[in-house]
Amino acid sequence: MKTLIIGINSKYIHPAMGAFQIYTNSIHPIELKEFTIKDNKENIIEFINKQDFDILAFSVYIWNISFIHSIISELKHVKTIILGGPEASYRPNDFLKYPNVQYIIKDEGEEAFNKLISELKGNKDFSKVPNLYYKDGNQYKFTYPKKPNIKNIKYDYSLIKDFKNRVVYLEASRGCCFRCAYCLASLEKTIRYLDFDLVKEHILFALKNGARVIKFLDRSFNINVNYTEAIIKFLKEHNNNYTVYQFEVVGDLLDKKIIELLKTVRRGQIRFEIGIQSLNETVTRAVNRTQNLFKLIENINAIKDNIIIHLDLIAGLPYEDKASFINTFNKTFEIFPDELQLGFLKELQGTEISLTKDIHEYIFEPNPPYEVIENKYISSKELDEIRLVESGLNKFYNSGNYPRTINYLFKELKLDPYHTFLKIVNFIGKTNLNKLQFDEVTIRFYYSLIDLVPNPEYLFFIIKQDYLSKFNIRPKIFWMQTISRKERKIIYEKFISEYPNLNIDTLYRYGHLEKYNNTYFLIIYNAQKDIYILKN
């Protein structure tokens, strides 16, 4: 049986780790091929047709399910298709319409895939295959759940190939001990740990191959304090001033010993993704997220000087109305994480949210990514408003393009974050955020704010600094220069007097000067892009 497993990724940078695992652990001859959802569908179908495979296997996720549906619908000549991945595992009936989709492997598939191929070659007694939906007439039957022994699972990270330009996904454990109502990981009841020596071996292999970003897939990374400490110490010992490690952690459960260790880590080496989701305790209880909000914020503040902090919020949770969400957003924003992701609740089949959606009168989009449209607590119009805030947050905060302006607006002036981002986007227009050039966006950004600040001229001075700092070479400017030649000469001499590393030739050749009253901003477009401030 000629068998092909295909991984279809959301982007090139994300390797098909699920497909890699099936391929690596297969005891049968099998071929592997990767594509992305941006690839031409006809080219993928042509590749499949040329090879004349007996069995095709796809791993189905929320980002590729529509694409895979469109491919399967044109593969009528392929008699046997095997599906895996969460979107097939929990939506098996969506694939009943395809006669050739005969088998769906639920959850972990390294062992189940091998047994399925063995039965296809042999007695075809599919009841012996764990985690398997198999077609029986016009319905699927499910065999029985069984997780493979994690100590027997093999890994081959060489399949990633391009370590410098792709995210390297590692795992130190599988499973999750939490029961978050919106998350598929909540269905995994126990945590199983890989041997620590094997985890170290994987890290060293990735480093040897020049990995730029290593992301651990563990859902509960900091639950086992000793394991967490051992891994962080190992990463610290092998710091190469280049690689970034990403972990999902439970913020309020960070141990004091771990916090002290994190304070010794190089800034930028470790990135924590922390799900806050909501600061309304009624909401968090409703989705089975009991968290100590005071401790959560205290821990984040304790480590954020060393650790890159990415915080998550979810709009559309049960009992969270618009006023509650605005409060959650504003208080979370005021932590000033490196990134704040404002996401929207999705209906993932099998989760408690999906099973109880009628109680809360949820309406979800019928197509991927199955995002919330409305519920009994928040209207579709209100959620659309929050989506405007999300687009402004991403463009002006998460992009990192306007740090000085953000600091001025929200740390100095203490403006309301939610309504400020809403005003900005309503002024500029959501579609213009990505359509307009950076200079045009910056101009409109300024005009959207002038009636919110006490001194528009000072605001413009700050925004100009952010604009000029965005570029590695001197950019075109969209404002009139107000510094005369004589004044420039005098100020340059003062800069040289205060900063002996500067010289007049460098300033005239590579420098750009701006001023507000008696304060001067100087940027030198050299290899380091040096910035200086002088108060005259």
Image: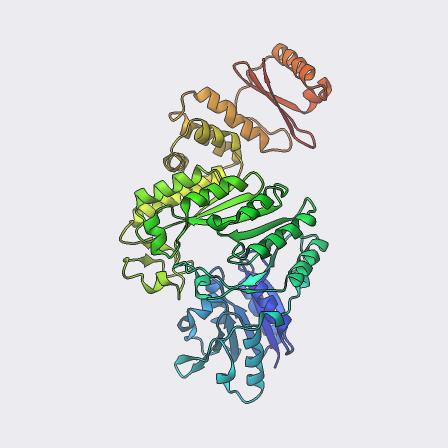
Can the viewer see residue 180 in this picture?
A: yes
What count of labels does the image hold?
Answer: 0
Q: Which part of the image, by quadrant, shows the N terminus?
A: bottom right
Can the viewer see residue 47 in this picture?
A: no
Is 277 in front, or is 293? 293
Is 11 in front, or is 89? 89
Could you say where residue 81 lies in the image, as x and y percent from the top left?
52, 76
Vertical placement of residue 432 versus 343, above or below: above
Give the farthest residue toward the bottom.
123
Could you say where residue 185 lies in the image, as x and y percent from the top left?
46, 62
Could you say where residue 286 lies in the image, as x and y percent from the top left?
33, 55
Give the farthest residue toward the front.
257
Q: Quadrant of residue 120?
A: bottom right
Is 301 in front, or is 33? 301
Q: Which part of the image, by quadrant, shows the C terminus?
A: top right
Could you say where residue 209 lies in the image, as x and y percent from the top left?
71, 55
Q: Quadrant of residue 156?
A: bottom right
Colouring scheme applied when the structure was drawn? rainbow
Q: Residue at x 27, y 60 (%)?
A: 359
Q: Is residue 324 left or right of residue 391?
A: left
Vertical placement of residue 201 versus 337, above or below: below
Vertical placement of residue 467 versus 230, above or below: above
